[in-house]
Image (cartoon, grey):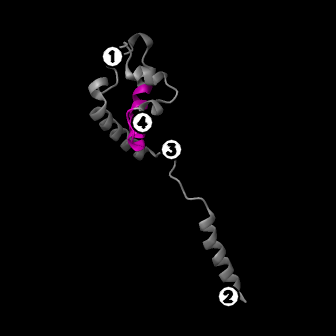
Amino acid sequence: MKTPFVTAIAICLVSSTWLLPPQRPSPHPDAGEQSAGLAQGKAIFVSRCSTCHDDNGNKKLADGTTLLARLAQSKDPEARLGTRLKNPQERRQVTLYIRSMIEQYASTPAGAKPH
Protein backbone atom coordinates (compact mmCIF):
# COMPACT_ATOMS: atom_id res chain seq x y z
CA MET A 1 0.00 0.00 0.00
CA LYS A 2 2.85 2.39 0.83
CA THR A 3 4.85 1.59 -2.30
CA PRO A 4 2.32 2.96 -4.86
CA PHE A 5 1.85 6.10 -2.74
CA VAL A 6 5.61 6.71 -2.43
CA THR A 7 6.08 5.98 -6.13
CA ALA A 8 3.33 8.47 -7.04
CA ILE A 9 4.91 11.16 -4.86
CA ALA A 10 8.35 10.51 -6.40
CA ILE A 11 6.90 10.74 -9.93
CA CYS A 12 5.17 14.03 -9.06
CA LEU A 13 8.37 15.53 -7.66
CA VAL A 14 10.48 14.49 -10.63
CA SER A 15 7.93 15.65 -13.19
CA SER A 16 7.43 18.98 -11.43
CA THR A 17 11.10 19.84 -11.96
CA TRP A 18 10.56 19.46 -15.71
CA LEU A 19 7.52 21.71 -15.61
CA LEU A 20 9.18 24.55 -13.71
CA PRO A 21 10.79 27.30 -15.78
CA PRO A 22 14.59 27.19 -15.78
CA GLN A 23 16.37 29.30 -13.17
CA ARG A 24 17.80 32.46 -14.68
CA PRO A 25 20.71 34.38 -13.23
CA SER A 26 19.75 37.37 -11.14
CA PRO A 27 19.59 40.62 -13.14
CA HIS A 28 21.27 42.31 -10.17
CA PRO A 29 24.81 40.98 -9.73
CA ASP A 30 26.24 40.66 -6.24
CA ALA A 31 29.05 42.99 -5.15
CA GLY A 32 31.81 40.59 -6.24
CA GLU A 33 30.36 40.08 -9.70
CA GLN A 34 29.73 43.80 -10.08
CA SER A 35 33.29 44.64 -9.04
CA ALA A 36 34.70 42.11 -11.51
CA GLY A 37 32.36 43.37 -14.24
CA LEU A 38 33.41 46.96 -13.51
CA ALA A 39 37.11 46.07 -13.81
CA GLN A 40 36.51 44.13 -17.02
CA GLY A 41 34.38 46.97 -18.38
CA LYS A 42 37.16 49.46 -17.71
CA ALA A 43 39.70 47.20 -19.43
CA ILE A 44 37.43 46.85 -22.49
CA PHE A 45 36.71 50.60 -22.57
CA VAL A 46 40.40 51.51 -22.28
CA SER A 47 41.43 49.04 -24.99
CA ARG A 48 38.61 49.74 -27.45
CA CYS A 49 37.26 53.23 -26.76
CA SER A 50 39.92 55.39 -25.11
CA THR A 51 41.68 56.29 -28.36
CA CYS A 52 38.74 58.53 -29.28
CA HIS A 53 37.24 59.18 -25.83
CA ASP A 54 40.17 59.04 -23.33
CA ASP A 55 40.14 56.62 -20.40
CA ASN A 56 37.41 58.60 -18.65
CA GLY A 57 35.18 59.46 -21.62
CA ASN A 58 35.87 63.20 -21.34
CA LYS A 59 37.76 63.87 -24.57
CA LYS A 60 35.90 66.49 -26.60
CA LEU A 61 34.43 65.23 -29.82
CA ALA A 62 34.10 67.19 -33.07
CA ASP A 63 30.79 68.72 -31.97
CA GLY A 64 32.24 69.88 -28.63
CA THR A 65 30.48 67.28 -26.47
CA THR A 66 31.99 64.28 -24.72
CA LEU A 67 30.93 60.65 -24.73
CA LEU A 68 30.34 60.83 -20.99
CA ALA A 69 28.06 63.87 -21.33
CA ARG A 70 26.11 62.20 -24.13
CA LEU A 71 25.63 58.97 -22.19
CA ALA A 72 24.71 60.88 -19.01
CA GLN A 73 21.81 62.43 -20.93
CA SER A 74 20.77 59.14 -22.53
CA LYS A 75 17.84 57.17 -21.15
CA ASP A 76 19.55 53.92 -22.17
CA PRO A 77 23.35 54.23 -22.28
CA GLU A 78 23.72 50.49 -22.88
CA ALA A 79 21.69 50.72 -26.09
CA ARG A 80 23.85 53.61 -27.31
CA LEU A 81 26.98 51.59 -26.59
CA GLY A 82 25.46 48.77 -28.64
CA THR A 83 26.24 50.66 -31.83
CA ARG A 84 29.94 49.92 -31.25
CA LEU A 85 30.02 47.02 -28.78
CA LYS A 86 28.17 44.10 -30.38
CA ASN A 87 29.00 41.47 -27.73
CA PRO A 88 26.22 41.71 -25.09
CA GLN A 89 28.48 40.66 -22.19
CA GLU A 90 31.15 43.21 -23.09
CA ARG A 91 28.47 45.87 -23.52
CA ARG A 92 27.07 45.15 -20.03
CA GLN A 93 30.55 45.30 -18.50
CA VAL A 94 31.37 48.60 -20.23
CA THR A 95 27.97 49.92 -19.16
CA LEU A 96 28.85 49.16 -15.52
CA TYR A 97 32.07 51.14 -15.94
CA ILE A 98 30.33 54.01 -17.76
CA ARG A 99 27.55 54.18 -15.15
CA SER A 100 30.15 54.59 -12.40
CA MET A 101 31.67 57.48 -14.35
CA ILE A 102 28.23 58.98 -15.02
CA GLU A 103 27.52 58.95 -11.27
CA GLN A 104 30.75 60.88 -10.68
CA TYR A 105 29.94 63.23 -13.58
CA ALA A 106 26.43 63.88 -12.26
CA SER A 107 27.72 64.61 -8.74
CA THR A 108 30.26 67.18 -10.02
CA PRO A 109 29.01 70.79 -9.69
CA ALA A 110 27.86 72.21 -13.05
CA GLY A 111 30.64 74.80 -13.20
CA ALA A 112 33.33 72.20 -12.57
CA LYS A 113 32.36 69.63 -15.19
CA PRO A 114 35.46 68.19 -16.84
CA HIS A 115 35.97 69.22 -20.47
- Rendered location of residue 50, percent (x, y): 29, 28
Question: Which one is earlier in the sequence, the residue at label 1 or at label 3?
Answer: 3
Amino acid marked by disc 2: Thr
- Residue ID for mark 3: 28
The answer to whether 24 is drawn above or below residue 35 in the figure is below
Q: Say the numbered circle drawn on residue 83.
A: none
- Rendered location of residue 76, percent (x, y): 50, 30
Q: Main secondary structure of the magenta part?
A: helix
| Badge 2: residue crowd in 10 Å (few <14, some 14–19, many ≥20) | few
The CA distance from mark 1 to mark 2 is: 76 Å
- Residue ID for mark 2: 3
Which residue sits furthest bottom?
1
Residue 36 located left or right of residue 2: left
78 within the magenta span: no
| Badge 3: residue crowd in 10 Å (few <14, some 14–19, many ≥20) | few
- What residue span does the magenta drawing correspond to? 84-103
Q: Is label 3 in a helix, a strand or a loop?
A: loop
- Kindly report which numbered mark, 1 or 2, lies closer to the viewer in this rendering: 1
- Kindly report which numbered mark, 4 or 1, lies closer to the viewer in this rendering: 1
- Residue ID for mark 1: 60
Quarter of the view holding residue 55: top left
Question: Which one is earlier in the sequence, the residue at label 4 or at label 1?
Answer: 1
Q: Is label 1 in a helix, a strand or a loop?
A: loop
The CA distance from mark 1 to mark 3 is: 33 Å
Q: Is label 4 in a helix, a strand or a loop?
A: helix
The CA distance from mark 3 to mark 2 is: 45 Å
The CA distance from mark 4 to mark 2 is: 55 Å
Amino acid marked by disc 1: Lys
- Residue ID for mark 4: 96
Q: Are marks 1 and 2 in contact (CB under 8 Å)?
A: no
Question: Which one is earlier in the sequence, the residue at label 4 or at label 3?
Answer: 3
